[in-house]
Image: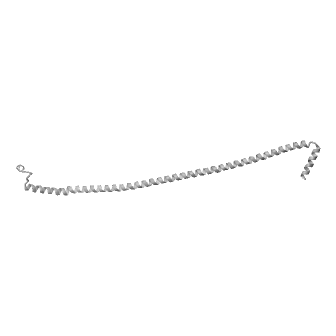
Amino acid sequence: MLFLADFSPIKPDFGLLFWSTLFFLIFWLLVGKVAFKGIANGLKERAKSIQESLDEAKKARVEMQNLVSENEQLLAQAREERAQILREAKEAKDQIIAEARERAKSEGQLLINNAKEAIENLKNEAMVDVKNKAGLLALEVAERVLRKELSNDDAQVNYVQTLLKEIK
């Protein structure tokens, strides 16, 4: 214990300084060989895994950008196809309406022509019927007039002679 009473940390003696330095260097070499190698390897592996993660993240970002651009292209293509389908549907609708109008117009014109023809036929039939009735009426009137005028024999003979003269 006497040794400890004589110890002063402010003023170490040479032996203590030598042995402390020697033990420190041995400890440093042992720790450097055993512990620092493991720590250094662990740090290298960690740096490697971080770099791999960064590379994978970069690849994922590039793939996401490609997917986004592909999605935008697909959306644009889908919009274009939808617009094309709508245009085709509108054209088909307009064509169907035009055909229906044309068919209705031609059928209407046909009905009008048939109606005019039927009216003309009925008109001609009515005219023939009126002429026939007028002729019959004229004949009846003429017959009655002739009967009345030709009621005596002298009048009949004079009328027949007049008719013969006209015929010649």
Q: How many labels were placed on the picture? A: 0
Q: Position of residue 146 (x, y in %)?
A: 89, 44
Q: Position of residue 27 (x, y in %)?
A: 15, 55
Say which residue appears at 20% left-offset and 56% top-offset: 34
Quadrant in which residue 145 is drawn: top right
Toward the viewer: 154 or 97?
154
Locate residue 132 relative to residue 79 in the image: left or right: right
Q: Position of residue 83 (x, y in %)?
A: 50, 52
Say which residue appears at 27% left-offset and 56% top-offset: 47
Say which residue appears at 69% left-offset and 49% top-offset: 114
Q: Position of residue 44 (x, y in %)?
A: 26, 57
Quadrant in which residue 14 is drawn: bottom left
Toward the viewer: 151 or 114?
151
Locate residue 41 relative to residue 94 in the image: left or right: left
Toward the viewer: 135 or 24?
135
Colour scheme in use? one colour
| Above or below, 26 relative to 136 | below
Locate residue 114 relative to residue 56 in the image: left or right: right
Say which residue appears at 95% left-offset and 44% top-offset: 154
Locate residue 47 relative to residue 78 in the image: left or right: left
| Above or below, 153 relative to 30 | above
| Above or below, 142 relative to 45 | above
